[in-house]
Amino acid sequence: MSAGSAGVTNRQVRLRARPVGLPRPDDFELVETAPGELSLGEVRVRARYISLDPAMRGWMNANRSYIRPVEVGAVMRAAAIGEVVLSRHHRFQVGETVVGMLGVQELGVAHGDQLLKVDPALASLPTLLGALGGNGLTAYFGLLDVGHPEPGETVLVSAAAGGVGSVVGQIASIVGCRAVGIAGGAAKCRHLVEDLGFDAAIDYKAPQGGDLRKAIEATCPDGIHVYFDNVGGEILDAALGQLAVGARVVVCGAISQYNAEGRVLGPSNYLNLIVKRARMEGFLTFDYQDRYAEGHAQLAQWLGEGRLRTREHVVKGIERFHEALMLLFTGDKLGKLVLELQ
Ligand SMILES: NC(=O)c1ccc[n+]([C@@H]2O[C@H](COP(=O)([O-])OP(=O)(O)OC[C@H]3O[C@@H](n4cnc5c(N)ncnc54)[C@H](OP(=O)(O)O)[C@@H]3O)[C@@H](O)[C@H]2O)c1
């Protein structure tokens, strides 16, 4: 039976209410529907893995940021990877593997122009979604294009054991920099140094000497030339205090602030940007769409050469969406977080 036939059902996670602070289970509902007809140009995809991204928290809020909010009652927006099961687009055939914004659902539909074909022989599906997908591209363009790291410089990255951060540190090493990661817990810090080849790691939950600023100072004695910020808040402030002259602060994300119910905590240490003649710059991976193929090819080459190592944390079952999402905020996971669908 094809996915367009009668009798096929599609389970999807919808946003039931806008979360206040940390999302709660009843902010979402799991709904079973029948897939509709495809319009010309559309493609139906059976999702195998859904990408769980911190940005999803922002999309649940009413205010528009760089993209419109997810409407209450709508399918939760998410990137996913899966196989084409029905196509009304000339470029896509049944059975091909694609990535796109397909939502948290078993059977997603997107216009073919919004889907990217990927080669499942290159890597596992979670890796294609993570280190060779959005996370890897974010690390690649954010570090190289915004951070401009030079050989011999020190690159510090926060949320370093996560999807984006783990790739940032490894690219920093590849281009000849000293890679230092900040992560929560001794096990993650060991993983950064022993498995991913970081030069040093700082456990922000229990920094050596009991003080994060001092730990950064001790680990980056020549100053930080590039700080790749994934978390914002107090860790950003601590990093700003140890910038080298001419440093670049890449503002990628601020996960410590995404569930803030009041005002977002901004950097109070920013006067050091003046003292160090430093620059702080935000970026969006979306802006590099024209260069995705370049980034993907380079990341795939590094992966093939064994210079880029990947790790994914897989949670099985669409019904565990909320539980899985929370791991982004508790940090109880290692590497790229994905939801596997049966
Ligand atoms: N600008 C863009 O276009 C773009 C694109 C993609 C992603 N991003 C951003 O990149 C960042 C990383 O995303 P990702 O998908 O790779 O997520 P991730 O790093 O795999 O997961 C989030 C990690 O953040 C850490 N964390 C959570 N709460 C924290 C807190 N209060 N303080 C410090 N660390 C905290 C946790 O690690 P620990 O155990 O180490 O605490 C957690 O594992 C996010 O901020 C995201 O919004 C930006």
Image: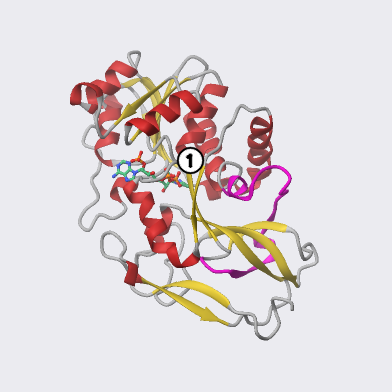
Check residue 107 for magenta coloring: yes
Q: Badge 1: how crowded within 10 Å, few (<14), some, or many (20+)?
A: many
21 lies above or below 272: below
The residue beneath circle 1 is 164
Task: Give the residues drawn in magenta, as a range.
Answer: 104-129
Q: Quadrant of the N terminus?
A: bottom right
The residue at 71%/65% (across/down) is 84
Query: Which percent across, then down, holds residue 170?
Result: 52, 28
Please identify the quarter of the rendering in which residue 204 is found. top left
Look at label 1 and name its amino acid: Val
Please identify the quarter of the rendering in which residue 30 is found. bottom left
Check residue 147 for magenta coloring: no
In the rendered structure, the answer to whether residue 31 lies left or right of residue 92 reads: left
Between 12 and 136, the residue placed more toward the observer is 12
200 lies above or below 299: above
Between 45 and 276, the residue placed more toward the observer is 45
Disc 1 within 8 angstroms of ligand 1 (CB) = yes
In the rendered structure, the answer to whether residue 267 lies left or right of residue 15 reads: left
- In what element is the residue under mark 1? helix
Query: Which percent across, then down, holds residue 182?
Result: 35, 31
Residue 250 visible at all: yes
